[in-house]
Image: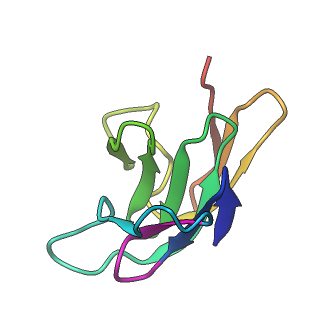
Amino acid sequence: MRIKNSKLWLLTQNQGLRELSLSGNEPQRIHHFIKNEREPVKVRLMYIAQNKYIWVATQQGLYVYNPSTGESKKYIHSENDEFSIPNNSVWNLDEDKEGNLWISTFQGGISYLNFN
């Protein structure tokens, strides 16, 4: 659960990301961008970055959601891409003062994403 810009963001295990307005003027919205047709996605945590993007760490990859546009993307490990995340099981996310996102993974080590 995070509060940002008069919005309450709730990350759920089975029902996606819920957005609630704290002003009470907007209806609740549910964002179902975290999905896998074969099995439930095991979410670990949510992080709201300085650029307002919402990052969701899961055991099946890293998701990013842009609340302004409604667009989302999933990042997964690829043996053929040296710039992919080192492991699909993402355990923690943090951001440094320069706005880089640090990603820690299970048995894959730590990597970072530079937004510049």
Question: In the depicted view, which residue is nearer to us: 42 or 83?
Answer: 42
Residue 90 visible within the image: yes
Q: Residue at x 79, y 26 (%)?
A: 98
Name the image quarter holding the N terminus.
bottom right
Q: Residue at x 37, y 71 (%)?
A: 16
User: In the displayed structure, does residue 62 sit left or right of residue 51?
Assistant: left
Q: Residue at x 43, y 67 (%)?
A: 17
Q: Is residue 17 magenta?
A: yes
Q: Extreme left residue here?
A: 37
Residue 97 location (% of width, % of height) = 84, 33
Q: Is residue 70 magenta?
A: no
Question: In this picture, which residue range is highlighted in magenta?
Answer: 12-21
User: In the displayed structure, does residue 86 sit left or right of residue 104?
Assistant: left
Q: Is residue 15 above or below residue 50?
A: below
Residue 75 location (% of width, % of height) = 39, 46
Question: In the depicted view, which residue is nearer to us: 24 or 57?
Answer: 24
User: In the displayed structure, does residue 54 sit left or right of residue 81?
Assistant: right
Numbered label tally: 0
Q: Residue at x 68, y 62 (%)?
A: 3
Based on the displayed image, in which of its 4 quarters is residue 78 positioned?
top left
Q: Is residue 71 above or below residue 83?
A: below
Residue 65 location (% of width, % of height) = 43, 47
